Structures are given as C-alpha cells and as structure tokens.
Amino acid sequence: MSLWKCGIDGCEQRFEEAEAAVIHQTVDHDRHECTVCGSVVPDGYFAIRHAFEEHSRAEYVRAYDADSSAVRVREEIKAAIEDEADLHSVVEELKRRDAL
C-alpha cells in the first residue's frame, strides 16, 4: 500500500511519492475557491497551503465551519508534504504541464 493518498472528494488514489500526489491533486481535480477571499487555487495541498499562509486560523474556522481537529489535520498534512516533497520540482512539473 502506498504512503500518500489523495483524499479529495473520496478519491482513493495512492502514490509512492508526495510529489506525485500533489501533481495528481492539481491536474486531476477541480480547483477550489477559497471561502475567505475568493481566490481559486488547486485543491488539496495547495488549497491547504493557501488557507494557512494567507489567512488566520480563526478566518479558516469561521469560513469553513471547522473545529480545532480539522485545523490540526490540515496542518499535519501540510507539514508532512513540506517535509517530504521537493515542492520546487512539483512547481516546475506543473509549469511544464501548464497546470498552474
């Protein structure tokens, strides 16, 4: 069983590398409109990163009717991907595919 699972809208695809999971989320799923500011970003990792780098935790909780557990899960996902993935290579691959 692979380590990285997509998880968007019940997607069960699994990936050996974090980079492949992030690329899949960006290319194979619809974009997400931020409820806080209206920005449209790729769903999955990039949506989580946007929410927590562009907005406060309180804004996220209010906008998404989230609780502290939901925030913690997303922070853990963000940290795990950032610890594991070569995000520079992900961005370069997405630019090559014209997906960003």
Image: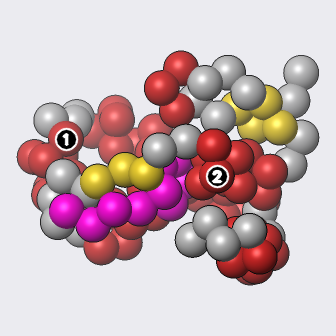
Q: Which residue is mark 1?
A: 64
Residue 68 pos. (x, y %):
27, 38
Number of callouts in the render?
A: 2
Which class describes the residues within 10 Å of circle 1: few (<14), some (14-19), or many (20+)?
few
Looking at the image, which residue is at 86% across and 49% down? 17
- Residue 3 showing in the rendered view: no
The magenta span reads 38-46
Identify the image quadrant of residue 78. Answer: bottom right
Identify the image quadrant of residue 40. Answer: bottom left
What amino acid is at disc 2? Val
Residue 2 pos. (x, y %):
87, 29
Looking at the image, which residue is at 22% across and 34% down? 67
Disc 1 is placed on an element classified as helix
Disc 2 is placed on an element classified as helix
Looking at the image, which residue is at 54% across and 54% down? 45
Horizontal side of 40 relative to 47 (left or right) equals left
Horizontal side of 92 relative to 32 (left or right) equals right
Circle number at residue 4:
none
What amino acid is at disc 1? Tyr
Does 44 appear in magenta? yes
Q: Which residue is mark 2?
A: 27
